[in-house]
Amino acid sequence: MSTSLPASASSSFPAAPVTPPAVSRVDAYVARQAILDVKGRVFGYELLYRAAPGDTACRLNKDLASARTMTEAVIDFGVDVLTGGRPAFINLTRPLLVDEACTLLSPASAVFEVLEDVDVDGEVIAACRRLHQLGYQLALDDFVAGSGAEALLPYVAFVKVDVLSTPAAELEALAHRLTRPGLTLIAEKVESREAFEQCRRAGYGLFQGYYFQKPVMRSGAALPAQHAACLRLLSELNRPDITVGQLEALVKQDATISLRVLRCVNSAGFGIRRDVSSIREALVLLGLGPIRKWASIWCLASLSAGRTPELATLALVRARSCERLGEGLPDVAEQELFLVGLCSLLDAMLDKPMPEALEHVALAPAVQHALLGEPTATRYLLDAVVAYERGHWDDAIRAARSAAASDAALPAAYAEALTWTRDLAL
């Protein structure tokens, strides 16, 4: 993931939000789940949808939910905000498939998943053939060998197989039988590294699930020197009593961060655009708070090097979402919320349990307590954001309310975080 400064940044970091149209709406939840390739790179995102934030259960049937997902993606959020230019995987029910409603989106912007409960008959086969001829990519969701979906195989580009409900022998048999040019197998609900490795060896090309967010436990292993240096810098950066002089000394220890500080000063988004003669002058111009946060981001990006870039991206989305969701709450601090989100995947980045990972970085007690799961307002906000990103809408609502936050603010916070993170990666 690139961590260059976005043009939209301001000297009062975090940048004033570039508000996407979705922020003005409060009647829809749209989140995304990454689909990764064998090297951990993001291939696309499945879009998840929920109707009203005040509901305790989704009252939309699948047809309306799929239609609303497309509407929200195109009109409100914008597909590019949700997917960063990668394909959006969107569920398609029988009426939307037969009526070719998916032609509202361009063939390049989406992959349409034919749900497992669609009765495959002549009308459905003809619709899939037609969409295939028009250049649309289709996927079979929760494919089961011997089902009616077999008749659609000539017209689909992806077949998704549920790893949790499919025996290991059948996973391999499906891969052997279905592998052909133009067809990619997606292993979904991949919850562990072991499941990922098994599916990778069997021939699956794409993977969906939370496996990449979980550490490969190596409790006894020493931290690489680069990681140790980043963690020391992260600890020092977030000392509440740090001075400009101390920050200058820290920044000078890292040539990459020093260069980025100087580039910030010359960024049009900061409104400064002037030559500086020293790192200290640059820090004074930028401000202690903003540069401390930027440097923390750069540290976390370095820690995730060698793992899937989605780890760093997800940490940034969480950090910004927590910060936005907690605005105005009396019992939480902006800096704490940002750090909790940013460090919420520290265990996966370091391949250590969270308690052990936190031994290597000195964070404020409130931040550590939240990361360790203690029931504080800060922790509830993190829980709300994590539940939201996973499409666990009811859990997200309960957690937000436990933090005294408005659950109606969840879609706006998440949408703005996606936009902010996308701009950050430019």
Image: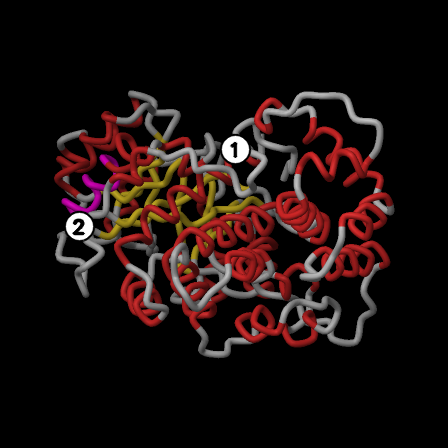
Task: Give the residue pinned by disc 1.
Answer: 423
Instruction: Please check the rendered image and state whether residue 399 is part of the magenta-colored stretch, yes or no.
Output: no
Number of marks in the image?
Answer: 2
Q: Give the residue type at disc 2.
A: Lys
On the image, the x and y values in percent for residue 277 come to 84, 27
| Mark sitting on residue 62 | 2
Callout 1 crowding tier (Cα within 10 Å): few <14, some 14–19, many ≥20: some
Left or right: 370, with 401 as reference point: right
Quarter of the rendering containing residue 107: top left
- Magenta span covers which residues? 63-71
The main secondary structure of the magenta stretch is helix
Q: Relative to the observer, which residue lies in front, 317 or 244?
A: 244
Secondary structure of residue under mark 1: helix
- Residues under numbered marks 2 and 1 in contact, where contact means CB atoms less than 8 Å apart: no
Residue extending furthest bottom?
A: 374
Q: Gap between marks 2 and 1, in whole Å?
A: 33 Å
Going by the numbered disc 1, the residue's amino acid type is Asp
Residue 208: x and y, percent? Answer: 47, 53
Q: Residue at x 37, y 43 (%)?
A: 415
What residue do we see at 53% from left, 58% from top?
341
Q: Is residue 101 above or below residue 356?
A: above
Q: Does 65 appear in magenta?
A: yes
Q: Nearer the viewer, mark 2 or mark 1?
A: 1
The image shows residue 73 at horizontal and vertical percentages of 30, 36
Quarter of the figure that contains the C terminus: top right
| Quadrant in which the N terminus appears | top right
Rendered position, 376 above or below 149: below
The disc placed on residue 239 is none
